[in-house]
Amino acid sequence: EVQLLESGGGLVQPGGSLRLSCAASGFTFSTYAMSWVRQAPGKGLEWVSAISGSGDGTYYANSVKGRFTISRDSSRNTLFLEMNSLRADDTAEYYCAKNGAGYVYFSLDSWGQGTLVTVSS
Amino acid sequence: DIVMTQSPDSLAVSLGERATINCKSSQSVLYSSNNKNYLGWYQQKPGQPPKLLIYWASTRESGVPDRFSGSGSGTEFTLTISSLQAEDVAVYYCQQYYSVPFTFGPGTKVDIK
């Protein structure tokens, strides 16, 4: 059974940084692309970033490009999202999701429970 | 960026009746080399993460009841729930994964009438 467990969320001041982690199990981590999707309170889903299974391809939403960095450690079966220069509109539940194959151009077939990031002074 | 729109914003359907949700993309998400539409449908129940229902516009994910079906091609797509059950109350989102950024529609809320 695929399991994705996010951690690292919390309260951070505007301009601050945070690093999210997603521990994966139940599948061969290195052979699947992974993604981050966020959801602001009471709002819809927003795709944030994705990384190929090999890690050599990374992709970002315009709203986070230059501020967020996605990475993965296949030795630890863990996905990361490094978030810098955080703004109030980054406040959201952040979901880790597994793509359907090694390339990012696939649907998201498994999702974690999410970790809440709140950016506020 | 590809803009995804959905209609209606919300709908209320009687138990056992059909629910239909529409999704449009601002440009085609059909990849001609493999004839696949890069379009997925997700269900999100209150307090839960999204769940994949349909991918490639019409392929049902394993374990999804067959009352859920997807159709359409190019820029216009439909999710149909053939006989609404109480457990289908949720918000439904379409998403294109044809080009980065992989945009979602705004969602359609489905309730029981």
Image: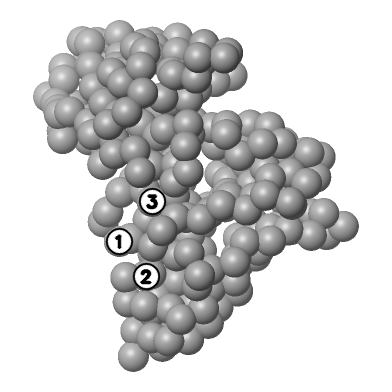
Q: Residue at x 22, y 11 (%)?
A: B18
Residue A109, position in %: x, y? 57, 33
| Mark found first going from the N terminus, 3 or 2 | 3
| Mark found first going from the N terminus, 1 or 2 | 1
- Which part of the image, by quadrant, shows the C terminus of chain A? bottom left
The residues bearing labels 1 and 2 have C-alpha atoms spaced at a distance of: 8 Å
Q: Residue at x 50, y 14 (%)?
A: B32
Find numbered disc 2 in the image and state the secondary structure of the residue it sits on.
Answer: loop
Residue nearest the viewer, comparing A9 with B84: A9
Q: Chain of mark 3?
A: A
The residues bearing labels 3 and 1 have C-alpha atoms spaced at a distance of: 12 Å
| Mark found first going from the N terminus, 3 or 1 | 1
Q: Which residue is outermost to the front?
A: B33
Find numbered disc 3 in the image and state the secondary structure of the residue it sits on.
Answer: strand
Which amino acid type corresponds to the residue marked 2 in the rendered image?
Answer: Thr
Residue A41, position in %: x, y? 30, 61
